[in-house]
Image (tube, rainbow, N blue to C red):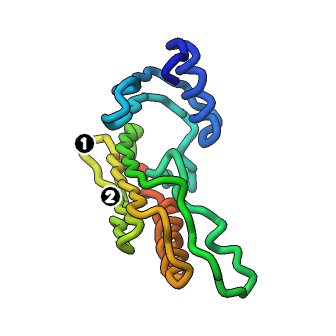
Amino acid sequence: MLNASLADRQKALEAFLGRFLNGVVLQEADVANLDKIDETLIVHYRFMDAHYAQVAGDLLLVRPRVLGAKVDEAFEARNGKERKYPVEFPAATSQGDVIEIALPAGYNVDELPPPAQADTGIVAYQSKTDVTGNVLHYNRLYQIKDVLVPAARFDELRRFYRQIASDERSSAVLKRIVQ
């Protein structure tokens, strides 16, 4: 992205968003600290997907985790065999998401996903969903603190990623206001 033009950066971001959403329209995008390798890379973008929520009668189901999955299915594929080698992550990382979803007129929040928190000392995850006015706020933080996980801790790692998977699938429930 460093040597890409603004138009090429936007195309790359649209392609990224398109992997998660079908009707996405990128409205604005900005990259901070791209040329500062000793600072945190920050990508701000705003987009719209008018068909994101799922309708179920008088309810709308909205998954707050719009983009990106932190779960790796490889932790489930063991075929009953005990792991012999450590798990090696590509790098230590800290990834945060702040997502704001404008709620449609005519609906109230009926139910929000509970906050999630898990920390093995090697990997950590937390998320929280709340509502202010007509905006649903979703914040999450995913951290890989150590790149090497001993084979003996594999089952703990699998349980950790199952917690994340559950959180990533959760939805907020909006109920149509009856007048």
The residue drawn where x is 52% and y is 17% is 3
Q: Is residue 178 visible?
A: no
Q: Label 1, on which residue?
A: 133
The amino acid type, in three-letter code, at marker 1 is Gly
Side (left or right) of 18 relative to 89:
right
Around disc 2, counting alpha carbons within 10 Å, would you say few (fewer than 14), some (14 to 19), or many (20 or more)?
A: some
In the rendered image, the vertical position of residue 77 relative to residue 103, given as above or below: below
Residue 161: x percent and y percent? Answer: 51, 69
- Residue that sits furthest to the right in the current view: 79
The residue drawn where x is 43% and y is 55% is 92
The residue drawn where x is 60% and y is 62% is 72
Residue 63: x percent and y percent? Answer: 49, 53
Residue closest to the eye, 125 or 138: 125
Residue closest to the eye, 133 or 122: 122
In the figure, residue 103 lies in which quadrant? top left
Q: Tag 2, which secondary structure?
A: strand
First in sequence: mark 2 vs mark 1 = 2
Side (left or right) of 166 relative to 96:
right
The amino acid type, in three-letter code, at marker 2 is Lys
Residue closest to the eye, 75 or 50: 75
Q: Label 2, on which residue?
A: 128
